[in-house]
Amino acid sequence: MRCPFCQALDSRVLESRANDDQYTVRRRRECVACQRRFTTYERVELSPLLVVKQHRTREEFDRAKIRRGIARACEKRPISSSQIEELVDEIERQLRTEYEREVPAADIGVKVMQRLRTFDGVAYVRFASVYREFRDVETFAKEVLQLLNHKENLEDTLS
């Protein structure tokens, strides 16, 4: 494993452990040359999942795109990067369970919104405003009201 600091090729593993998802191994490493420590992750390689775009073009699934979209929606919110990574893991796991080879791009956006809606209302509205391309304030306000009504109904059910 190449050291990200000095680019040396030799490092030793100090600690290995499975992540909560059981599909990823976290390894703590130390560079033999500069003695700096870094973390690597090994992920099970699954068959490629293709995303079918709106105009029927296909591209390989890229979890980094989901992570970027969620991170942008969660900016300045009390949400850690590990929580974002867990959300991305859950969404990817759900997609791979429901779809064998191809997934419609629209379904990815819907799944992200579903997870964000229960996770953080502000992040949900931010993501939805971009994903659904809100054109005016009225549409935005309507979405916020629906979120508030959903939250009240949920609280009533739990009481």
Image (cartoon, helix red, strand yellow):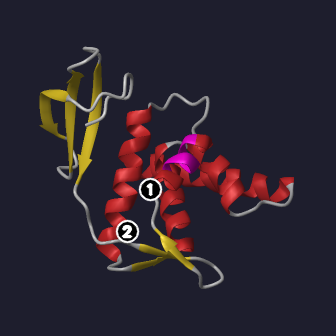
Tell whether position 6 is magenta: no
Tell me where residue 73 sits by quadrant.
top right
Q: Which mark is residue 63?
A: 1
Left or right of residue 153, residue 44 in this image: left
Q: How many marks?
A: 2
Q: Where does label 2 land, which residue?
A: 95
Q: Amino acid at mark 2?
A: Leu
Residue visible at 30% across and 34% down? 2
Q: Nearer the viewer, residue 125 or 68?
A: 68
Q: CA distance from mark 1 to mark 2?
A: 11 Å
* 6 w.r.t. 22: above or below: above
Q: Residue at x 49, y 48 (%)?
A: 67
Say which residue appears at 59% left-offset and 77% top-offset.
53
Which SS class for mark 2? helix
Secondary structure under the numbered disc 1 in the rendered image: helix
Q: Which mark is residue 113?
A: none
Main secondary-structure element of the magenta-colored stretch = helix
Residue 54: percent from the left, percent from the top? 64, 79
> Can you tell which of label 1 and label 2 is closer to the viewer?
1
Q: Is residue 100 above or below residue 6?
A: below
**15 shown above or below 40:** above
Q: Using the rendered view, name the quadrant where residue 17 is placed.
A: top left
**Which stretch did the figure color magenta?**
67-71
Residue 84 is situated, as x and y percent measured from the top left of the image, at 44, 41
Sequence-earlier tag: 1 or 2: 1
Q: Quadrant of the C terminus?
A: top left
Measured as percent of width and height from the top left, residue 62 is found at: 46, 60
Q: Amino acid at mark 1?
A: Arg
